[in-house]
Image: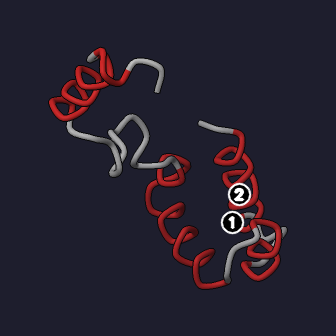
Amino acid sequence: MTQKELNRTEIFLNVKNKKLNQVQAAKELKLSVRQTQRLYKKFKKNGARALVSKKRGMRGNRQLNPSIKEKVIELIKYPLYVGF
């Protein structure tokens, strides 16, 4: 878990133990109350695991297809484009 995810877990544990309410938690997390409610609902159901990013380890949406990337690298290595 990242430090941000650990901080979220700690804040949601405080909400669960009634040391904070969801409005105060939203201010600490710098999120809207609605977003905090959504995250807290997941936290109650699945625990700290629910706060971990689901996209971790996945390929980014804006990456080039590997075959296109190889073609571009070959073109750049072509003597006409040396120095660019």
Q: Which mark is residue 13?
A: 2
Between 9 and 70, the one lying in front of the other is 70
Q: Position of residue 42 (x, y in %)?
A: 47, 65
Cβ–Cβ under 8 Å for marks 1 and 2: yes
Q: Position of residue 40 (x, y in %)?
A: 58, 69
Q: Position of residue 71 (x, y in %)?
A: 19, 27
Amino acid type, mark 2? Leu
- In the picture, the quarter occupied by the N terminus is top right
Label total for image: 2
CA gap, disc 1 and disc 2: 5 Å
- On the image, which quarter does residue 56 sit in? top left
Q: Residue at x 30, y 15 (%)?
A: 79
Q: Residue at x 52, y 75 (%)?
A: 38
Q: Which residue is mark 1?
A: 16
Q: Left or right? Give the position of 78 relative to 83.
A: left
Q: Left or right? Give the position of 73 relative to 82.
A: left
Mark 2 Cα-neighbour bin, 10 Å: few <14, some 14–19, many ≥20: some
Query: Looking at the image, which residue sits at the far front?
Result: 80
- On the image, which quarter does residue 31 sit in? bottom right
